[in-house]
Amino acid sequence: MKAGLESMQAERDSALLERDALKRERESLQAGRDEMLQTNDRLLGRDLLFQYFSLALERTIQVVQARLEEAELKVPTTF
């Protein structure tokens, strides 16, 4: 019984660590995106390369968000 609880706690801790790491990664990517958008606002136009990287970064954020949502589902809410 105690081993089962310890195993569940370890699984929960692992899921929480993964979730927190993904949150930090998402926040970092979003900050990078925001900085890019601010830089672009200071410039007078967007070129195709900037648009490509902006879209790629947005897609990466979406993928990390999906992984974060999956990680949050792994976190047990009850014991």
Image (cartoon, rainbow, N blue to C red):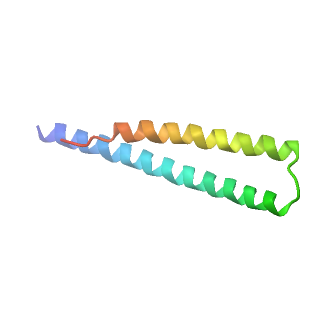
The part of the image, by quadrant, that contains residue 62 is top right
Nearer-the-camera pick, 37 or 31: 37
| Farthest-out residue, left | 1
Which residue: 82% across, 47% down? 50
Looking at the image, residue 70 sits to the left or right of residue 64; the answer is left
Q: Quadrant of the N terminus?
A: top left
| Farthest-out residue, bottom | 42
The part of the image, by quadrant, that contains residue 10 is top left
Looking at the image, residue 22 sits to the left or right of residue 34; the answer is left
Q: In which quarter of the image is the C terminus?
A: top left
Nearer-the-camera pick, 43 or 3: 43
Looking at the image, residue 48 sits to the left or right of residue 37; the answer is right
Which residue: 85% across, 43% down? 49
Q: How many labels does the image show?
A: 0
The part of the image, by quadrant, that contains residue 34 is bottom right
Q: Residue 36 placed where, x, y %?
A: 74, 56
Above or below for 31 versus 63: below
Q: Residue 16 placed where, x, y %?
A: 37, 48
Q: Residue 30 placed where, x, y %?
A: 62, 53
Which residue: 55% across, 41% down? 64
Looking at the image, residue 11 sits to the left or right of residue 24; the answer is left
